[in-house]
Image (cartoon, grey):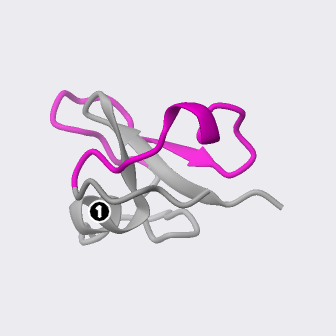
């Protein structure tokens, strides 16, 4: 089963915790499995996108969170 391991927004990849801190506080519905509103947009107005554990690029391209610089879980 796939799960969300990160999100892409503002031209970088971010861990679930940092994304939740940035977007999870907004009172909007519906939300994904991590509590992130599905209609969230970054500062440029682009939609944020989840990165799933089953995505092929997860283990080769995304290694660190662009916000907290911690390694991303896979």
| Part of the protein shown in magenta | 39-67
Residue 5 lies, in percent from the top left, at: 55, 57
Looking at the rendered structure, the secondary structure element under dot 1 is helix
Question: Taking 28 as reference, is 60 above or below it?
Answer: above
Residue 43 lies, in percent from the top left, at: 15, 36
Q: Main secondary structure of the magenta part?
A: loop
Q: Is residue 33 left or right of residue 28?
A: right
Numbered marks: total: 1
Q: Is residue 9 left or right of residue 5?
A: left
Q: Residue at x 35, y 68 (%)?
A: 17
Q: Residue at x 50, y 69 (%)?
A: 34
- List the residue tagged with mark 1: 18
Residue 53 lies, in percent from the top left, at: 68, 52
Q: Which residue is farthest right? A: 1
Rendering quarter of residue 74: bottom right
Rendering quarter of residue 51: top right
Other-residue count near label 1 (Cα within 10 Å), few / some / many at <14 / 14–19 / ≥20: some
């Amino acid at each position: 089963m796939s799960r969300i391991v990160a999100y892409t927004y503002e031209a970088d990849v971010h861990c679930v915790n940092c994304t939740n801190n940035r977007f999870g506080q907004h009172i909007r519905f519906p939300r994904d499995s991590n509590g992130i509103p599905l209609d969230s947009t970054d500062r440029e107005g682009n939609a944020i996108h989840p990165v799933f554990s089953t995505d092929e690029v997860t283990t080769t391209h995304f290694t660190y969170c662009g916000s907290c610089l911690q390694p991303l879980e896979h």
